[in-house]
Amino acid sequence: MLGCAKVLCPAYGIRGGECWLIPKTHCDDTADDDFFKKLSSCLTCSYFRLRGEHHEQGWNYFIAEQLHRYNAKALERIYQKEESFVEILNRIPDGLFTTDREWRITYFNPAAEKITGFSAYDAVGMFCKDVFKNPICETNCALKRAVAEGRDIHNQEYEITDINGNQVPIICSTSAFQDSQGKITGGLEIFKDISELKRLQQEIVRREKKYRRIFEGSHDMIYTSTIEGTLLDINQAGIEMLGYTDKQELLRLGSATRLYRNPGDRDYFIERMNREGYVKDFEVDFRKRDGSTLHVLISSRRYENPESGTIEYEGIIKDITHRKQTEEMVRQRNRELSILNSIAVALNHTMDLDDILEITLKKVIKVLKLERGGLFLIDRPNSTIRLKARYNLPNVGTGDRDEVVFRDALLEQSLTRENVRLIPEAAFPPFQVRYRASGYQTDLWLTCFLITFKGRGVGFFGLQLPSRRVFSQHEIHLLGSLGNFLGGAIENTQMMATIRQHRHELRRLTEKLFQSQEDERRRIARELHDEAGQSLTAVKLGLDRLEERHAGNRPDLSAEIREIRRMINRTASEIRRLSYHLHPTMLVDLGLEPALNLYFREIRKHSGLEIEFHMVGFDQRLNADMETVLYRFSQEALTNTLKHSGAERFTLSIIKSYPKIIFQAEDDGTGFDTRVVGRDRQSLGLLGMRERVSLLGGRFLLRSQPGKGTRIRIEIPVKKELIHEATYSRTAG
């Protein structure tokens, strides 16, 4: 039970341990001459083995001879132990060899054969420097140093050259053999091929360099941290992104939670990481060193550190502040376009100024994210300001004070009393007015932005801003653009209202003119019929009396009287014709259809024009005014045909087709270019027809082409007041 001095013995260096091979240790030089004990030690001795192998009959014969000579049973037991020990050495994966004190190899296991390429048969007996072929073996051999210094040397790395000339990196551990007196008898070396390890180390170094190159060269922040939030590492881009001077200053923050603008976002981030193991494109706001906001996008994963076994986070953080600003700018532009589009749509659908101002104010309040405001117009003739649209703005109070009071009295005077022309600008500076509101202890101060048209102020937006709200230049520019755009819309709307009023007055005057014209025609017709007709009748009676008294004996006087009577008859006929043309009595007495039949019969008699006339769908007479209008339309259409077309056929149809009356006149004359009506033709009659149709709310259509005749179509809505109460009579013809 002694500690063995041989490194191959499992009891080597262990005092009190039991030897696994024999009860005593190897090479026990005790005084005991018992061969059993001697042989058990000698079988593990390289020198003894060498002598046995050089026996003239070989090693096996040498052992067998000793066995027969001494205790065969004991020898068999020891020999089996020796064989098992060698088998163990042959099975280990690392190369192993032993040398004598002259550095000749005495044992070479299969692993050593594989690494060096030398077979054990060739290697045993060679100097180790000849097998490993490394200059270091000559000068700084680990095995020689272990033998020389009498100590073990571990984990020495160097390269050897295998039998094929390839460089093989190895790592070795060496020990020296000592006998019982401490004398060096040889050495042992265990070595391992670390080619794969070296390759892995080089790959690790390469990947580390690549990682560092990516880590430091990235324009995005790359970080690692503990699950508690302690920053472990961060690249230079992250340091610059957050506005810190160096890495250590940033790492001294202690916790990544301090980087979050809202600490609750960090809690939500951790919850997702622990649930899913990763987070992709997590959008959040960071706080930079100077306190400003940084919009970032985080992509991170959760992993276990292979060295420490702790859970850590790593990821990439992108600065999307510029993108967010661009997105906000695009949204702002869309909101601006929405306002302008809303105003344009309002202008297309309505010309009511109150609706336009109401829509515009609501859009402005929504886009600027305000609570209340108003839109005021300047009433310069009355030198006042009128509130035209409001949004959550309270009603004005009662009392002697004005509704709004300017902080700058000179500005108020310039806008309301003086005709000041402003130099056009994209946006005018804002100004303040005080709005007097009922139910409020203090008046509301509104920030105002001018609405202008051609250098003249026409109104302003009045917006209540929160105490810390300051409009950006972009918002001021927006209000300036809206002010310029809305100023034109206000002026155009007011101008259109004035035009509508003037047109309404013009229609009334035109209607009055037509009515006056008809009244004058009736008066002239009546005077011609009554006054001139009676006068001619009186003249005729006077001639009759004169003829009775004096013409009997004077033939020449009788002939003169007859000639005068013929002239009176022609004059009376012409007066009747003129009177009927101005206002036919039959139209009043019998209605439209008999009057037109009589009129067309007279025209046929004198012109030779073929006329076709139809009235369809009338079971009641129209009122007198409507019958007069249709009669005048018929006269005008036929007159134009007779004067200008050279037609042979004229067709007129008047049809009652609910909900309208259709008047259609057509001829087969030369026609004309409708684009030049009013310039090179006597078209006042057509223009008069068009105007009368417009007054009746109807539709006037004129179709004509040179050589293809002319068609006039008039559609007049049927109204109850246009129908006469009496039943229509069809007695004429």
Image (cartoon, rainbow, N blue to C red):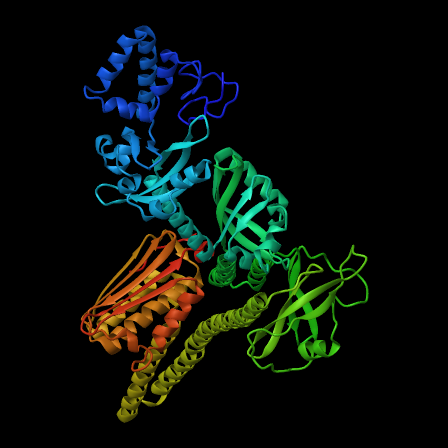
Q: Which residue is drawn at 25% across and 45% down?
A: 166
Q: Where is residue 71 in the image (x, y as percent from the top left)?
A: 32, 7
Q: Where is residue 69 in the image (x, y as percent from the top left)?
A: 28, 9
| Left or right of residue 496, residue 561 in this image | left
Q: Residue at x 47, y 55 (%)?
A: 220
Who is closer to the viewer here, 442 or 47? 47
Q: Position of residue 435 (x, y in %)?
A: 74, 64
Quarter residue 93 falls in = top left
| Left or right of residue 420, residue 330 in this image | left
Q: Disc count in the image?
A: 0
| Left or right of residue 570, residue 437 in this image | right
Who is closer to the viewer here, 423 or 389? 423
Quarter residue 446 falls in = bottom right
Seen in the picture, residue 400 relative to 621 is either above or below; the reply is: below
Seen in the picture, residue 287 relative to 30 is either above or below; the reply is: below
- Look at the image and tell me whether residue 287 can be seen: no
